[in-house]
Image: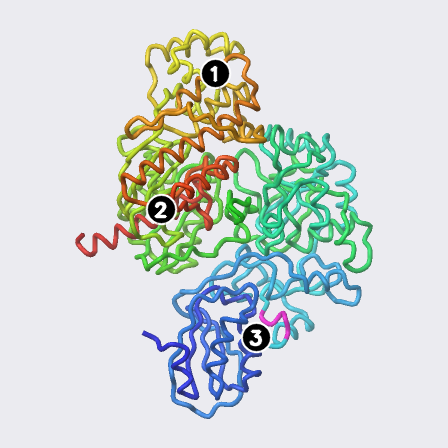
Amino acid sequence: MAPSPTSASSASRARVRVRGAVQGVGFRPFVYRLASRYQLGGYVANDAEGVLIEVEGEALTEFVAALRDEAPPLARVEAVETEALRPIGERGFEIASSRAGRQATRIGVDAATCEACLDELFDPKSRFHLYPFVNCTHCGPRYTLTRQLPYDRANTAMAGFAMCAACQRDYLDPLDRRFHAEPIACPECGPQLSHDIPEIVARLRRGEIVALKSLGGFHLLCDARQQKAVAELRRRKGRDAKPFAVMIASEASLDAIAEASAAERELLRSVERPIVLLKSRGTLAPAIAPSLDRIGVMLPYTPLHHLLFHAAAGAPHGRDWQQAPVDLVLVATSANLGGDPIVTSEAERQLGGIADVIVDHDRPIVVRADDSVAMVLDEQPYLLRRSRGYVPRPVQLPHELPPVLAVGGLLKATVTATRGREAFVSQHIGDLGSAATVRFFEEMVAHLLAMLDTQPLLIAHDRHADFASTRFAESLGLPLLGVQHHHAHVAAIAAEHGVTAPLLGLVLDGHGVGSDGGNWGGELLRVDGARFQRIGHLQPLPLPGGDAAAREPWRMAAAALVVLQRADEIAQRFADQKAAPLLAQLLARGSFPSTSSAGRLFDAAAGLLKVRAVQHYEGQAAMELEALVARPRVDSALWRIAGDQLDLTPLLARLAMPGIDARHGAELFHGTLAAALADWVIQAAERAGLSTVALGGGCCLNRVLMTELMPRLRAGGLTPLVARAVPPNDGGLSLGQAWVAGLTVIEQASGA
């Protein structure tokens, strides 16, 4: 075991190992400046395990403490280990070359343009004035342009750009902000944009659609205030109703389009720059987010984005313009078609039928990454999609695991590889329903394992045999472990929060194959590491048509009517659905399997209230139902707890009453469901002798439900945990699978 930092003070020379995200973030020049401050000799170098320092002098204790306390803004110091050495009388300090070896470090995330670079971007005296690719060690691209470790320019997309004399001088100066900033470039030597900024903005103002090459792929842009332009983008992209995200010039433009709390504003301007879901003021084109009350908003995160808004503001001098609203608001959506991954190259071929103009540049995108999406829950960030800005930052585990690979599920796919106490969760890959997305998925597995230089001992996958991810796992020829879908949801939360003791898991999800082969989705589990027990579930409803039921909420409403013994109403209630009469007959005969899915319960409610009969995207009915809620309402007579089941039939009966107002019904549904779930979980926790409950599954993205549920659980003496490092939906499945797989390997090795 390495000596503590304090023990190094007894020697006049020490070897210091710094682990974490410490490459490509200005850590070596930071160490150089610290050594100069404390008059220390020695050297600092990047190597396969992070940063290695040998340092000699009198102020070693102060130096080691400052490594943590004053680290650069993008650095994440996870360990500082010291070892006393024999003094050699060294007085000079240098930054040494990178050292090769088996990789145990990692690269940083793609970070939003820092304030210092923005100052230069808009300073006419700077050589970076109006240059769309300005960056430094504190900001700019990292993950999306890195081919392999170590993180040196030759291993990035910048390898083909020879530095000019000025950039070379900055790159080699340990006191410069750009010392060893691998993407460093200027107008003399760096990437070039295919179109002039004023031309791009003029075309956006005219209502045209622009494909713009960004960090992890192309965006499709249009003027978010022009209904015609937004509707045309929907038509060309084949995206009927799924909401678009928008980008604004600065925080000064926010209040005109959305309401935001202090926590939401902080998340919006964080270095990760996610899309943040905010309460809409309804001032943008209605086609942005049809029938929803929230919109996804993000701030610019590249110099190119800032330059677009600068031109829209009239290209004023300085940066004062960012303190005032800019009228241009841009739809900024991923450039893809038909569920394929975001486009990173060959844009003319792939996007020529969508965009009126394609704005390219000559810096390659090595790794594709969509924008991340988040909201604020309980005053903290809560991820819906984890990608640019967060990946490849690992999740810290409570203890070391053997190397395993987990391949996730079918929807919102991610993959996870473990290394020691770190779990590396890939960026959002997408739904594995197209050949292109499956290829991207396979590429990410290879890329992740190569970056980590690790070979998994076990492959974890979902128990659904027909998932593309399961078939891929089977093709690898390595030992396999099928992890039950809802167990994985709870395990992801346990892994992130470092919970190794047994806990309850309330999983509110769309669908997952249960241990009995059934259709689970509203589950109460007792989870103990690699094992789980189903101790309760929502009372099942018929599942009329399998996947069709998930696409057509009216089918679940019909199923609810059958349970309520009102099957004779189905044909009339859903007269606009041709299949309704036949479905009513089949339901009456009991021709369908059942499901305990919470997602299908939401669909049933939306169908009964006539909110949505047919969905154009996953979760549309539930999202539109949530958007109707102004004040949740609770009726304690509308649920029953029967043994291990939560029976919400009385609630469905109320929603099925003739003439019920959709808004009133939505408020009653959300409030009563939250109260019922809390009652159910609190009783189960008392019987099980547990006080911690993990809340996971796609329905846990419902802000109204979670805002009502969590305080009720706390009032009942429980500690609710939610996913923070990964999404609670299927985007977090691979982390939970990896945790279960790693624990399984440990148990097998110990003979347990």
In the picture, measured across the screen, residue 528 lies left or right of residue 272, that is left
Q: CA gap, disc 3 to disc 2?
A: 45 Å
Residue 752's spot in the image, x, y percent? 18, 52
572 and 439: which is toward the camera = 572
What type of secondary structure mainly makes up the magenta span? loop
Residue 651 appears at what percent x and percent y?
Answer: 44, 22
Q: What's drawn in magenta, residue-wise?
A: 176-180
Residue at 72% x, 38% y: name it: 223
Which amino acid is tagged 2? Thr
Asked whether the beta carbons under mark 3 and mark 2 sit within 8 Å of each other, the answer is no
Q: Residue at x 31, y 57 (%)?
A: 401
Q: Nearer the viewer, mark 1 or mark 3?
A: 1
Q: Position of residue 708 (x, y in %)?
A: 49, 37
Q: Tell me, for residue 708, which label it has, or none.
A: none
Q: Specify which label sits upstream in the sequence, 3 or 2.
A: 3
Residue 582 quadrant: top left
Q: Which residue is mark 1?
A: 656
- Mark 3 belongs to which amino acid? Pro
The secondary element bearing badge 2 is classed as strand
Q: Earlier in the sequence, mark 1 or mark 2?
A: 1
Q: Going 57% across and 35% down the picture, which residue do you hit?
A: 337
- Find out whether residue 178 is within the magenta segment: yes
Q: CA distance from mark 1 to mark 2?
A: 35 Å
Q: Position of residue 510 (x, y in %)?
A: 42, 31
Tell me, yes or no, if residue 151 can be seen here: yes
The one of 480 and 297 positioned closer to us in this rendering: 297
